[in-house]
Image (cartoon, rainbow, N blue to C red):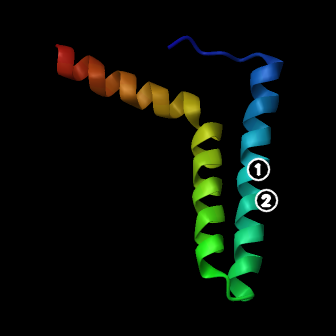
Amino acid sequence: MKKRKGFGQLIITFAFAYSALLCHFHASELKENGDIYTALLYWFFGLTALAGAFRFKIAGVIEKLIGKNNE
């Protein structure tokens, strides 16, 4: 995978990280109010947003694993 270091990619990465942070704080508030199922859903959303922020690192790890299997 080609590494992209453009300004747009940096903005999108920060947007994913900020979204994950907002989801975590909202889920924490929901948990305090007793709405545990919705809180779990928001934590899942936050986890997927965090995975989006680390998408290039995850892709690099997967490429290394696939490359080792093909050799």
Say which residue label 2 marks. Answer: 22
Say which residue label 1 marks. Answer: 19
Q: Residue at x 34, y 24 (%)?
A: 64
Query: In the image, is residue 31 above or below residue 62?
Result: below
Looking at the rendered structure, the number of numbered marks drawn on it comes to: 2
- Tell me the amino acid under the disc marked 2: Leu
- Tell me the amino acid under the disc marked 1: Ser
Image x and y of residue 59, in percent: 47, 27
Q: Residue at x 19, y 15 (%)?
A: 70
Image x and y of residue 52, in percent: 62, 38
The residue lying toward the viewer, choosing from 62 and 48, is 48
Assess disc 1: are there few (<14), some (14-19) or many (≥20) residues with their C-alpha within 10 Å of its C-alpha: some
Left or right of residue 20: residue 55: left
Image x and y of residue 45, in percent: 63, 54
Assess disc 2: are there few (<14), some (14-19) or many (≥20) residues with their C-alpha within 10 Å of its C-alpha: some
Q: Residue at x 40, y 31 (%)?
A: 61
Distance (Cα) linking label 1 and label 2? 5 Å
Q: Residue at x 82, y 20 (%)?
A: 7
- Tell me whether circle 1 and circle 2 mark residues in contact (CB < 8 Å): yes
Image x and y of residue 11, in percent: 82, 30
